[in-house]
Image (cartoon, rainbow, N blue to C red):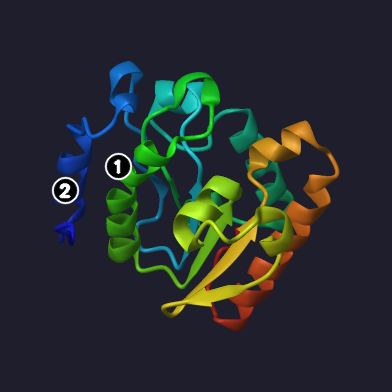
Amino acid sequence: MEHYMCKTWDELEAEIKGCKKCKLCQNRTNIVIEDGNRNADVMLIGEGPGADEDRQGVPFVGRAGQLMNKAFEGLGIDRSKLYIANIVKCRPPNNRVPQEDEAQACLDYLRNQVLLVSPKIIVLMGSTALKNILGAEHKITTSRGSWIEKKGILYMPTWHPAALLRDDTKKIDFWHDFEKIIAKCDELQIDISK
């Protein structure tokens, strides 16, 4: 069944705020919808909120987000020029990977966000974002760092910043992937710099 797409941000926010489509709603403090520029040409999609995000209602503000911000600082990327969202809007218990039914319950909201933002580039941060957006046949280890075009949007899969906290060697890949994103932005005359 085709989901009705909200035409405005206010309409979409109202729909998300009362969401009880999956069990994640039971323990949330805040629904974490978005951060950044709603007219951005570059959108980042992560997995789901952690404890800090759940508390503050903003994506990527915890340790992984702080590490991402540090990388952006070094690369000269202005976070406020990007649009940031997650596969699920409510925190999975103990930061576990969102289950299939939880991701499915939230994906129409994310599709609606993509529709309203209309980005040229979408950065898929981690395996959960990659599989839910481009399909289960994609593996983050083999797809990351390569451009994938689908329906006029350029996708760049990369590591989730949380993976960098667990494995230092992934920081180099993450940095290089974002260098490719900056180069593509320059080519498409998209300004994401400070």
- The image shows residue 148 at horizontal and vertical percentages of 58, 73
Q: In which quadrant of the rendered image does the N terminus lie?
A: bottom left
- At 59% from the left and 37% from the top, the residue drawn is 65
Position of the C terminus, as image quadrant, is bottom right
The residue shown at (63%, 76%) is 184
Residue visible at 70% across and 42% down in the picture: 70
Q: Between tags 1 and 2, which lies in front?
A: 1
Q: Residue at point 51% right, 50% down? A: 129
Q: Is residue 88 visible?
A: no
Q: Nearer the viewer, residue 15 or 62?
A: 15
Query: Could you say where residue 55 lies in the image, as x and y percent from the top left?
Result: 42, 20
- The kind of residue tagged 2 is Asp
At mark 2, the secondary structure is helix
The type of residue carrying mark 1 is Ala
Residue denoted by label 2: 10
Q: Is residue 157 at all visible to an observer of this figure?
A: yes
Which quadrant of the view contains residue 91?
A: top left
Quadrant of res 114: bottom left
Determine crowd level at label 1: few under 14, some 14-19, many 20+ residues with C-alpha closer than 10 A.
some
Outermost residue toward the right? 169
Please tell me the numbered disc located at residue 105. Answer: 1
Image position, residue 142 (x, y; %): 72, 61
Q: Nearer the viewer, residue 104 or 117?
A: 104
The residue at the far front in this view is 137
Q: Report the side of 36 relative to 70 (left or right).
A: left
